[in-house]
Image (tube, rainbow, N blue to C red):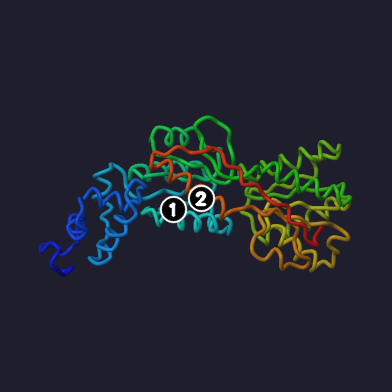
Amino acid sequence: MTPASLRPRATGRVTLADVAHAAGVSPITVSRALRGERAVDPALVERVQAAARLLGYVPDPAARALASQRSSHVTVLVPMLSNALFVDVLEAVQRSLRPAGYQTLMGVTHYNAEEEEQLLREQLLQRPAGLLVTGIERSDTARALIAQSGVPCVHLMEVSGAPGVYSVGFSQADASADMTRHLLGRGRRRIAFAAAQLDARTLQRRDGWRRELGAAGLYDATLEWLDPAPSSIALGARMFEQILRAQPDVDAVFFCNDDLAQGALLAALRLGMAVPGRVAVAGFNDLTGSDQMLPPLTTVRTPRAEIGTAAARMLLSLMNGEAVASPCVDLGYEVVVRAST
């Protein structure tokens, strides 16, 4: 029997029943095999997949949604795509979900609570199989939408010990405190903290800096430079010049993101200001190009791809009704010391 002879004459579309007939199994077995359920014998899975390839079968997401009352897609909400760290997360998520038969639908919140709420309303109407959301802090409305939906949800980039919350990330405050401790260990005493965007994770980094300087008896509120504008190289250059002009005794600037720190290093070159001789510069996230700056940038390396992979795997377990070993997975971070400090 040829593949063409198996296709329904009305539409020419290969159905689940056609694959089942070709593989010599029931339609429900085909469905389970193609969803990657572990209970299906591997040899049977291989036979079903071979029949599906032979026939050119493409699953009908609408039919699957009707059968399960949920679609085969996973919603992923991130704050921004201009920051490469979220691209790294998304790529890792997709690499983990696609082999299991799930498609990712992305929403960008632009760090705006109302946009996140609207995206959640729109996406939950489609009954996604799962949710991946960035961060722990969000509006009461957004939290209620997630909780009332009954859709499995994993939080990215932060960790939480709250009951019923699934999270994969690291402690933003601890990472910032460790970088501040490194600068103190290099003899720096007037350490400014420069931040943009001012989302929850940025403010957690500020809190880590405050905590460490406070413990050393060196905290000074005038050393905080906070700008709600989007983070960028250009903004980092401007902030660096403003800080050194207003506080000439500053001997280190810790930026909340690498693009700001990269701008600072470029400004220092333009001004002929020695780094780290006159002032040390540190960043956060170890973005592309930071190791190529002059001098190479000291920064906090964050495990974005690993977070995306681990979060997707946790979500797969939750969507399959399987137990999760730990609802809170802390993947840590690394202070990468280079020549800028």
Check the picture and name the quadrant holding the C terminus: bottom right
Location of residue 198 in the rendering, given as x and y in whole percent from the top left corner: 64, 45
Total marks shown come to 2
Q: Which residue in the structure is indicated by mark 2?
A: 78
Say which amino acid is labelled 2: Val
Location of residue 187 in the rendering, given as x and y in whole percent from the top left corner: 89, 50
Say left or right for 191 vs 198. Answer: right
Q: Which mark is residue 106?
A: 1
- First in residue order: circle 2 vs circle 1: 2
The picture quadrant where one finds residue 258 is bottom right
Say left or right for 292 vs 199. Answer: right
Q: Which mark is residue 124?
A: none
Say left or right for 233 vs 312. Answer: right
- On screen, residue 181 above or below 86: above
Location of residue 47 in the rendering, given as x and y in whole percent from the top left corner: 28, 59
Element type at mark 1: strand
Say which amino acid is labelled 1: Met
